[in-house]
Amino acid sequence: MYYLNPRLAADIFDNEYVIANLDTGLYYNVQGSAVSLLQALPFDAPVDYITQVMQANPANAAGIETELGNIWQQLLAEEIVKQSDAPVTPANRELPVAGVYVPSRFNRYADMQDLLMLDPIHDVDEEGWAVKQTP
Amino acid sequence: MEADKYFDDALQLFTSLPSFKTDVLLLAGRLVHLNTPSEALRNLFLPALSHLVVDKNNKQPGLTIWYAEGKNLAGKLNAPPWAEFNAQGYNASNENGDVRVFFQPWQKQVFLYSKSKQTAIYWVDTVSDVPWWEVTFSFRIIFHFWSYNLPAQLVHAGAIANETTGVLITGPSGSGKSTSCLNLLKAGYKYLGDDYVWIEFDETPVVHALYQTAKIEADNLRGKFYDWMPFIKNSQTYNDEKAIFDIKELFPQQWLPCITLKAIVLPAIGKRQYSSFHNAPPSKALLCMAPTTLHHLPHNRDISYKKLSYLSSRIPAYTWMLGYDVQNFQSSFHNFINNV
């Protein structure tokens, strides 16, 4: 089963997903029909949903497959979507019906990503405070 | 050692002081007591908050801040004993208890806050160990800790107003936020801050001036604010730091303590002659405001993010494409704020 990582803050504004990883300072937004892909979670097979979108928009099926496929891979790589061995309950749950395809984008904002342990090397005194470096 | 015990041991050092000076602040209707035995630290930290100072009274404060240099206290305070503080002064092991700790291990200062006691501590080894920027947003992290249980949020933004309308100007460092605020101040608008402001989530969000200082990089100062040169507070050091100004002192008629917010403005520097405003989606306001605010405020991010998300959804946002024509810069804002 694929599911939205519950450790992330995710909000929809005007049909746009804003996702924040507050542990790392990474932010994302998802626009277009890929929002519906996220809203359809949890599901067992993303290909089912993407196929449904392609069938609803046959004139642009190849482009949709590429675009949504790429975004899906990015969602997995950034651990916005996670996978578990548990199946979706109920098993026969129907995915939302896909409508007119809206070109989709996935943006990643890492400008303010927390720098982990960016600790200038320093000595400490007996109380544990940093000892000033002499020039 | 538990954070609670570390806090209590530190607090004992302060409450056993034989004498100290108390300053009383009033922020958004809430009293804050600042207690210190150090005149030197008081001279550093109080100016940024001086507009909030009120006469002493017998009412209970919502927040008490004790601050001192090591030499003022009868006993030593050891550095926080927990490993793995990150660059933002955050240690996840302290996140769920009563006490919050902000500590950057290469500095000789620590900020502590007890939610249950509504009491904070700032300890620094000597006055020379105070980073210069701390005095431009005095006790920033403590105000952030305090806001956890309040319908309020510290936001990395400036705020400008006319007689009736307040505008939040936000964006990451380098977006033109601070320079835009100070240019609008020069153009005659009311000023509530250019770096950090305090938002109260009333029926309609209200912005409060938290700091009355502004800081300007030396090159920017010489290029755009040259006439302010005689009023630099840190005239000996501003080339290596930033020039610091007391805005309420410089522009008393344009100082404003609070106003209802009507818009969030997201400046963007562009290579264009004319400035223009464009509608922006709430998501853009959130993505401009949250990363830069929460980067420096690593504790309680989930709560703060929800507040910023709420603010983004309540107040309309606009992108302000900045041009280099100064007259048009001002007229575009004039048209905007009178019609928002």
Image: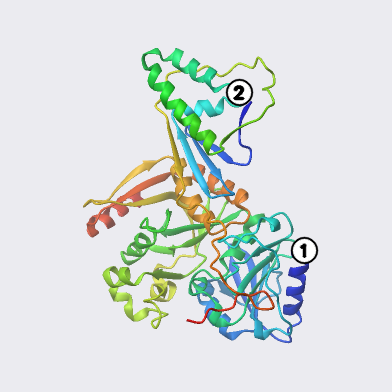
Instruction: Find disc 1 in the rendering and name its residue.
Output: B2
Describe the element under mark 2 as helix, strand or loop.
Answer: loop
What's the residue type where badge 2 is placed?
Phe
- Vertical position of residue B113 compared to residue B286: above or below: below
Residue occupying the point 67% across, 85% down: B72
Query: What is the chain identity of the residue bearing mark 2?
Result: A
Judged left or right of residue B207, residue A42 is right
C-alpha gap between disc 1 and disc 2: 43 Å
Q: Quadrant of residue B244?
A: bottom left
Q: Quadrant of residue B145?
A: bottom right
Describe the element under mark 1 as helix, strand or loop.
Answer: loop
Mark 2 nearby-residue class (10 Å; few <14, some 14–19, many ≥20): many
What's the residue type where badge 1 is placed?
Glu
Image coords of residue B102 (percent x, y): 62, 65
**Label ID, residue A109:** none
Instruction: Find disc 2 in the rendering and name its residue.
Output: A43
Is residue A33 visible in the rendered image? The answer is no
Residue occupying the point 62% across, 58% down: B147
Q: Nearer the viewer, residue B148 or A103?
A: A103
Please give the count of numbered marks on the rendered protein: 2
- Vertical position of residue B325 compared to residue A100: above or below: below
